[in-house]
């Protein structure tokens, strides 16, 4: 018997797979020597970071954790991030 509804599970799986794809690309570039232009590295890192943030949010929903409780706002954090 699943612990979560179908939509939450689907959302989690999609976020997990999207993050793994980005991590895989990072590994190909940094560990296996796949060639990319230097100006593409920032985009590669940003895509992985966004995919990880989406995965983290989906994981918290899967676990039933309210995101506001999990990550309280800090006064010194950039609000435009």
Image (cartoon, rainbow, N blue to C red):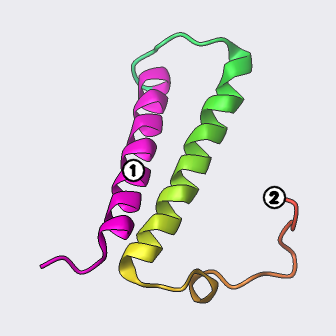
- Answer with mark 2 or mark 1, whichever residue precedes in sequence: 1
Observer-side mark, 2 or 1, equals: 1
Q: Relative to 22, is 68 above or below?
A: below
Residue beneath disc 2: 81
Instruction: Kindly identify the residue that appears in the image at 87 percent across and 68 percent down.
Output: 79
Q: Which mark is residue 73?
A: none
Against 3, is 34 above or below? Answer: above
Which residue is pictured at 41% across the width and 36% down the height? 21
Q: Quadrant of the N terminus?
A: bottom left
Which residue is drawn at the image coordinates 70% and 16% (left, top)? 38
Q: Which residues are magenta?
A: 1-30
Residue 59: which quarter of the image?
A: bottom left
Q: Residue at x 54, y 86 (%)?
A: 66
Query: How many neighbours does mark 2 have within 10 angstroms: few (below 14), some (14-19), or many (20 or more)?
Result: few
> From the image, which quarter does the C terminus lie in?
bottom right
Q: Which residue is mark 1?
A: 14
């Amino acid at each position: 018997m699943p612990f979560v509804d179908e939509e939450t599970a689907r959302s989690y799986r999609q976020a997990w797979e999207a993050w793994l794809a980005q991590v895989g690309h990072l590994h190909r570039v940094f560990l296996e020597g796949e060639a990319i232009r230097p100006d593409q590295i920032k985009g590669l890192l940003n895509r992985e970071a966004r995919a990880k943030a989406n995965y983290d949010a989906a994981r918290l929903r899967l676990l039933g954790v309210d995101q506001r409780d999990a990550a309280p706002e800090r006064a010194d954090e950039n609000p435009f991030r």
